[in-house]
Image: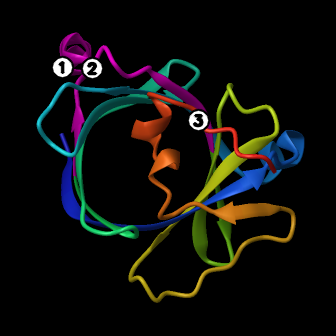
Amino acid sequence: MSCKNEFEIERKFLIRMPDIEYLRSVAEMCHIEQTYLKTDESSARVRKRGREGKYVYTHTVKKRLSDLRRIEHEREIAEEEYVRLLCFADPKMNVIFKDRYCVDYMGQMLEIDVFPFYPDRAFLEIELDDEAQRFFIPPWLEVIKEVTGDRRYTNAALAVDIPYDPI
């Protein structure tokens, strides 16, 4: 099983729902099922990611250092361990289901998350090598606002309450 322990530097944007047909033509899509675990850590989760019966399972612990930077310890796990860890799901948090579209744009990987509970909006995440790194947003995506520092828009927060700010 692979394991990584590193800093995650990420910018996150609330965007208008993109044209899904266009997105399917330019991006690689996978389904994600994310379950948060009871823990004393900042955030611990298990994730099932893939499609068409081919899945990868991971266990991730994140600790927030700033709005942009987190320490992330992620390891790939076997399906059996994933099922076992589901027994430790936090009952106060809903399972998050989303479709993730990954698209390479101007040499950077963009992740567009589409959730079933948002008919008119989605999220764009861009992982950076450093906090000052320049990035580019394609003209076919309409940014509503940056939510990098808005904790209501973390996946862990969405597992508890879904914000519906006017757009």
Point out the frontmost of discs 2 and 3. Answer: 2
Q: Which mark is residue 124?
A: none
What SS does tag 3 mark? strand
Please name the residue shown 41% across and 82% down the image: 131
Question: Compared with residue 121, is residue 106 higher up or lower down, i.e. above or below?
Answer: below
The x, y position of residue 32, in whole percent, is 50, 31
Please name the residue shown 43% across and 27% down the image: 55
Q: Which mark is residue 30?
A: 3
Q: CA distance from mark 1 to mark 3?
A: 21 Å
Which of 152 and 134 lies nearest the eye of the viewer?
152
Please name the residue shown 61% across and 81% down the image: 135
Q: Are marks 1 and 3 in contact (CB under 8 Å)?
A: no
Amino acid type for the residue under numbered disc 3: Cys
Q: Give the mark, 1 or 3, whose residue is nearer the N terminus.
A: 3
Question: On the rendered structure, is 104 left or right of 65?
Answer: right
Which portion, as a residue range, is magenta?
73-100
Question: Compared with residue 8, is residue 3 higher up or lower down, i.e. above or below?
Answer: above
Amino acid type for the residue under numbered disc 1: Glu
Question: On the rendered structure, is 166 left or right of 134?
Answer: right
